[in-house]
Image: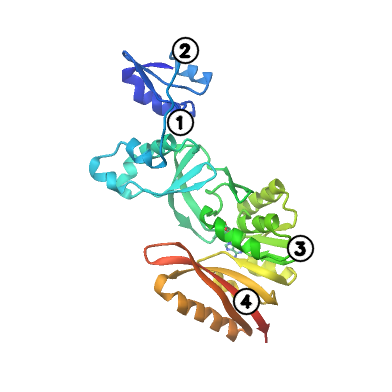
Amino acid sequence: MKVPKGKGEQVRKKLLEGDLLDISLKVRREGDLILFPVTSEAAASFGYQLEEGEFEERELAETDYKDLVEVPDDLRPLLPTSFDVVGDVAIIKIPDELLPYKGRIGLALREAFPRLTTVAMDKGVKGELRVRDLEVIAGGPGTETMHTEFGVKLLVDPAKTYFNPRLSNERFRVAKLVQQGEVVIDMFAGVGPFSIMIAMHASPEAVYAIDLNQDAVEYLRLNVYLNRALSVRPIQGDAREEIGELPQADRIIMNLPHSAREFLGDALAHLRPGGTVHLYQICERGEVESLAKDILGDADKAGFRVSLARLEELKTYSPSMSVYALDLLLLERR
Ligand SMILES: C[S@@+](CC[C@H](N)C(=O)[O-])C[C@H]1O[C@@H](n2cnc3c(N)ncnc32)[C@H](O)[C@@H]1O
């Protein structure tokens, strides 16, 4: 598409927003014109001349996004160096000083990472349902996307339900521990990443997947269907109440790192002796040993003899806190 030089930047942004710029090719200049490689004749709606032409391939390293953002030099060191990717949606935290430039950051990310269709700014996780407050800053308009991990397809809208792509290795580890015919309860299942991973990579008898968030359970049902993960039984409701209706389990997953501990008694009451709870808990880094001791002590007082089979730091949560995985083995009920 041939565009007069003065209009170049404005048109480039509009093309990017409309997914009409072929970012794998280099933009060219010809006299007073800028030649944009466009992806579709739909670009004709901009009112500029379209013609066939040759363009050079463009190589971009993943780190190049910073070179593409126009921000004042003193703010450049504040540009985020990492972000999460869920499907084709990037989720990025932006410091307050850079908020006036959030649109530019979004566009630069899309330009540098052609597989991203949407960039959303992360304004924090809120409430009991742990839903992320997201604002689309490039692409969009929505944030629904298809994420794939270890061959499991997960349709998810990170603005409506919690999903963390960084736990995929942990989910796969847990799935590999599941023995044939196990009954598994996933108390805080979200859109089903643990449950479906287990159904796809092991042979459980049933995986009961509970979540309070109606949107999460709708996606969970779709994901069960998408993956034909027929051993997964989605349940919408409060895990504490719903677990009472379920058969005794061989394994219980408790991924609610702020408050899972409060549900541990209910979980242990529904676990067969010899069974395992996978508990995820946020904790100050220096205090994890005493946290584990307290958890075992609380269980003991409630009549459950439990041993800690494994304790691992999974990811950092804040400068001083991390998310830990605790595998708890139920030895006996008194
Ligand atoms: C940290 S997320 C984990 C989701 C999922 N396991 C994953 O790995 O993506 C916690 C989930 O627990 C759900 N939740 C919170 N309180 C609950 C409760 N009382 N009963 C059932 N689910 C609950 C939230 O809706 C949220 O989806």
Cα distance between the residues tagged 2 and 3: 60 Å
Q: Which mark is residue 17?
A: 1
Calculate the distance from the C-alpha at mark 2 to the C-alpha at mark 1: 21 Å
Q: Is residue 290 above or below residue 134?
A: below
Looking at the rendered image, the disc whose residue lies closer to the viewer, 2 or 1, is: 2
Lower position in the chain sequence, tag 3 or tag 1: 1
Q: Residue at x 69, y 68 (%)?
A: 243
Residue holding disc 2: 51
Residue ID at (46%, 29%) = 24
* Residue 132 falls left or right of residue 78: right
Q: Which mark is residue 205?
A: 3
Name the amino acid, label 4: Leu
In this rendering, is residue 236 above or below 156?
below
Secondary structure at numbered mark 1 = helix
Position of residue 6 measured from the top left corner of the image (x, y, whole percent)? 31, 19
Mark 1 crowdedness (10 Å alpha carbons): few <14, some 14-19, many ≥20: some
How many residues crowd mark 2 within 10 Å: few (<14), some (14–19), many (20+)?
Answer: few
Asked whether the viewer can see residue 292, the reply is: yes
The three-letter amino acid code for the residue at tag 3 is Glu
| Quadrant (top left/top right/bottom left/bottom right) for the N terminus | top left
The tag on residue 329 is 4
- Helix, strand or loop status at disc 3: loop
Q: Residue at x 62, y 84 (%)?
A: 305
Residue 108 in the image, given as x and y percentages of width and height: 39, 36
Residue 263, picture quadrant: bottom right
Percent of width and height locating residue 213: 60, 56
Query: Where does the image place residue 167, in percent across and percent down from the top left?
Result: 54, 58
Q: CA distance from mark 1 to mark 4?
A: 52 Å
In the image, 96: left or right of 265?
left
* Structural distance between the alpha carbons of marks 2 and 4: 68 Å
Check disc 2 and report its element: helix, strand or loop: loop
| Badge 1 amino acid | Glu
